Amino acid sequence: MSAPAFFRPLHLPDFPWDTIAGAAARARSHPDGICDLSVGTPVDPTPELGRTALAEASDAHGYPLTWGTPALRLAIGDYLSRRWGAPQLGERGVLPVIGTKELVGWLPTLLGLGAQDTVVIPATAYPTYAVGAAVAGCRVVTAETPDDVADERPALVWTNSPSNPTGRVADAAETSAWIAYGRARGALLVADECYGEFGWDAEPVSALDTRINGGDVTGIVGAYSLSKRSNLAGYRAGFIGGDPAVVSQLLEVRKHLGMMVPAPVQAAMTVLLGDDEHVRIQRERYASRRQVLSAALVAAGYRIDHSQAGLYVWATLGEPGRVTVDRLADLGILAAPGDFYGTAGADHVRIALTATDERINAAAARLAG
């Protein structure tokens, strides 16, 4: 069926999860049920603190502020300074968003980028970076380091540390190099740091850290989420912080488009950003699951690469990742093939820690035979 004349096809890739439907069906047929380690969706409870705040704000009869309540703006700024060493950004330097996937997907369009613009993304990366650029009609270039794109003049540069899918952590020198690269070319650097609370073998650093950027956030924006740190994926609660000139312009566009985080969600975000204890508890859960699953994978002959932080294990048997996905599906374990995230990851699989202790233990037992 042809598209209507008014519809401009975007030539997007197939939705990746549709391509492993066969493996998913096979894993579900396991006598003891599927161990779904393919999607990084939290399974642990949303902290009571956030649920109470949401309920108490449920009489939300008026429209929420796109900019967020004053209390939320203050909470975001305090969190970024306390946790990530950011300078005081002020109200104009912070903005809530409707989950960070929405931000990633729409940012090139909201910035007014188009066919004349280049977007740099990591070589092994969350696919929505490329999808967002495609929606805006931009050219996409992949890179591991600034040297890989030394001859480019991009409008937008995405960095992602800790990485989804690999769990790789960029150190201070690498982060500084990307900042210098963006500034030398007049590009906006957007640092996706959504997994930063979960550093295991390396401590993540932020592009907003004054020690990294010299106390100057010009041309830098950081993206953050409460989905993982606070088990808030169903609330769609994210935010950005950084260059007030950029954030203010994004606020104006988002106001026109009605991109508003619901008021009860803003209330939950406010209290959860001020509480570190629930994050500590969640870190302990994931650390335990990581230890069990990583040990089982290594014992089964897998090599684990990177995986210094985040909620995934980046593993390989030295064969095409799709073959490994099928191998795991025969055990009732569903993983994501590395080619979801670019050709550079085609011989790996991404295995999520976001499953219950019982399912992680079941997967470990099946790997042991």
Image (cartoon, helix red, strand yellow):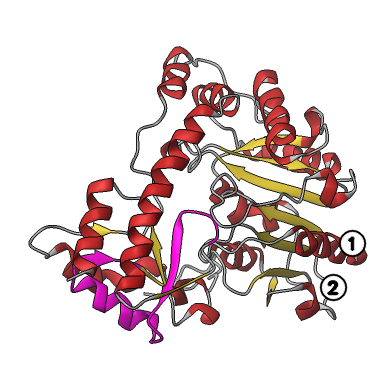
Tell me the kind of residue under disc 1: Gly
Q: Disc count in the image?
A: 2
Where 61 sits versus 110, above or below? Answer: above
In the drawing, what numbered circle is on residue 186? 1
Gap in Å between the C-alphas at discs 2 and 1? 8 Å
- Is 264 situated left or right of 67 in this image? left
The residue that label 2 is drawn on is 153
Residue 312 makes an appearance in the image: yes
Tell me the kind of residue under disc 2: Arg
Q: Quadrant of the C terminus?
A: bottom left
Residue 353 makes an appearance in the image: no
> In terms of sequence position, does the residue under pointer 2 or pointer 1 come before the other?
2
- Is 224 situated left or right of 231 in this image? right
Q: Quadrant of residue 65?
A: top right
Q: Residue furthest bottom?
A: 319
- Is 47 situated left or right of 244 in this image? left
